[in-house]
């Protein structure tokens, strides 16, 4: 891609990435939020993480099909157990990667 | 290796430690996790015909893992600038919810710092900062340090990936699983009570269902909004019935 159009591309991408990150934090942090909204916002993180993770484990391809018996899902079970007991981000990262690597060689 | 969490909860002597060290202690696993991801992103960039300098500036201006992966694949496919920018917008729209969620914790913080922090909001930095906020005080300076350390790791590893990526074989050392393993742990951090577990199950199940019928990434936002709303309704309902 030539430099001129590439600069326009990344500036455009940067702008549309920044605005959704900036607007709520900048404006909502200056006013008292209603308690119900706070309770709702508290549930957003867990919902986002689950919505990002679960489809990645049990669906496959484009267009997506339901495939719950994947290597990803198989490795996720011991990885989940390890993460549950250790609560260690770094440790789980290493364990998950090694298990996935091993599973890929065996299967 | 779980000392970041325990120390964060400990307080005491930590109060004297600088924001810099505390921020770095909380974020280092994400920085490590970004190395394989960033290398992979750099390799794809190289395959799409981008120079290391172009990849560097994309990571610097955009800082969005999945958004950049999609953008690079669209560049490879010869998509128009407008189409790539629009897709990036849609993919990164979920940060709107994360930003709103952080606003609850940084009421009345300085506007310059708020703006700085907002630039560093991605899935991983958001989850780590939220986790720190849950276990104790987590000043905005620490959140900024943590977010920018991850940002730095991302920019460097994507650029290096573009230089050397072609020498790394596909799925070496299970690199492809790095993000999944991180999300599993970050999700577990959030499961602090029954209502959170219920919300997670609702979000996961509805996201799977929606992802099968809607192309693209819109299912993430729709499933999140649905699950959080249902979670609040269930919580209110059980509180009302528990008291009477």
Image (tube, coloured by chain):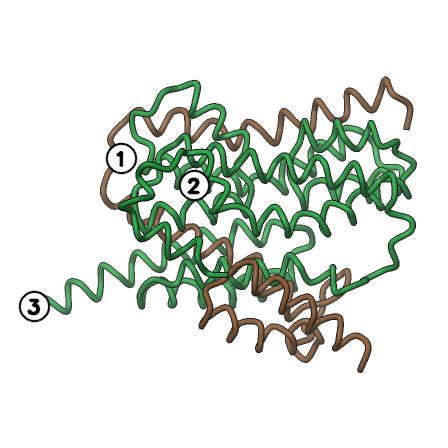
Residue A107 seen anywhere in this rendered image of the structure:
no
Percent position of residue A107, x then y:
80, 81
| Count of numbered circles in the view | 3
Locate residue A69: give its quadrant: bottom right
| Front-most of residues B119 and A13 | B119
**Residue ID for mark 2:** B22
**Element on which disc 2 rests:** helix
| Front-most of residues B34 and A91 | A91
The residue lying at 70 percent from left, 38 percent from top is B87
The residue lying at 58 percent from left, 54 percent from top is B219
**Residue ID for mark 1:** A33
Percent position of residue A38, x then y:
29, 44
- The hue used for chain A is brown
Disc with the residue nearer the chain's start (2 vs 3): 2
The residue lying at 15 percent from left, 63 percent from top is B240
Residue B24, label in figure: none
Report the chain shown in green.
B
Cα separation, mark 3 vs mark 1, equals: 28 Å
Q: Quick check: B64 above or below B180?
A: above
Q: In this view, does B105 lie to the left or right of A74?
A: left
């Amino acid at each position: 891609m030539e430099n001129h159009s590439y600069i326009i591309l990344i500036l455009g991408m940067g702008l549309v990435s920044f605005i959704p990150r900036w607007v709520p934090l900048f404006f909502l942090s200056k006013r008292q939020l209603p308690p119900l909204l706070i309770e709702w916002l508290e549930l957003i993180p867990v919902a986002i993480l689950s919505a990002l993770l679960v489809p990645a484990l049990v669906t496959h391809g484009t267009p997506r099909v339901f495939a719950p018996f994947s290597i990803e899902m198989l490795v996720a079970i011991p990885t989940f157990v390890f993460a549950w007991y250790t609560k260690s981000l770094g440790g789980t990262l290493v364990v998950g990667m090694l298990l996935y690597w091993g599973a890929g060689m065996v299967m | 290796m779980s000392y970041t969490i325990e120390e964060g909860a400990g307080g005491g002597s930590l109060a004297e430690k600088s924001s810099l060290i505390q921020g770095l202690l909380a974020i280092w696993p994400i920085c490590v996790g970004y190395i394989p991801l960033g290398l992979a992103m750099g390799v794809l960039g190289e395959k799409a015909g981008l120079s290391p300098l172009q990849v560097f500036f994309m990571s610097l201006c955009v800082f969005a893992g999945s958004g950049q992966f999609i953008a690079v694949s669209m560049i490879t496919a010869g998509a128009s600038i407008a189409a790539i920018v629009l897709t990036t917008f849609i993919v990164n729209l979920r940060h709107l919810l994360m930003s709103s969620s952080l606003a609850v914790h940084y009421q009345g913080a300085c506007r310059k710092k708020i703006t700085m922090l907002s630039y560093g909001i991605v899935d991983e930095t958001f989850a780590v900062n939220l986790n720190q906020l849950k276990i104790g005080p987590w000043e905005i300076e620490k959140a900024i340090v943590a977010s920018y350390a991850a940002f730095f790791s991302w920019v460097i590893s994507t650029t290096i990936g573009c230089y050397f990526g072609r020498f790394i074989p596909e799925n070496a050392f299970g690199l492809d699983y790095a993000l999944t393993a991180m999300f599993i742990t970050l999700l577990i951090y959030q499961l602090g009570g029954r209502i959170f577990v219920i919300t997670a199950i609702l979000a996961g199940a509805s996201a799977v269902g929606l992802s099968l019928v809607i192309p693209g990434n819109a299912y993430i936002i729709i499933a999140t909004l649905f699950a959080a709303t249902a979670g609040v309704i269930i919580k209110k309902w059980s509180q009302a019935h528990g008291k009477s």
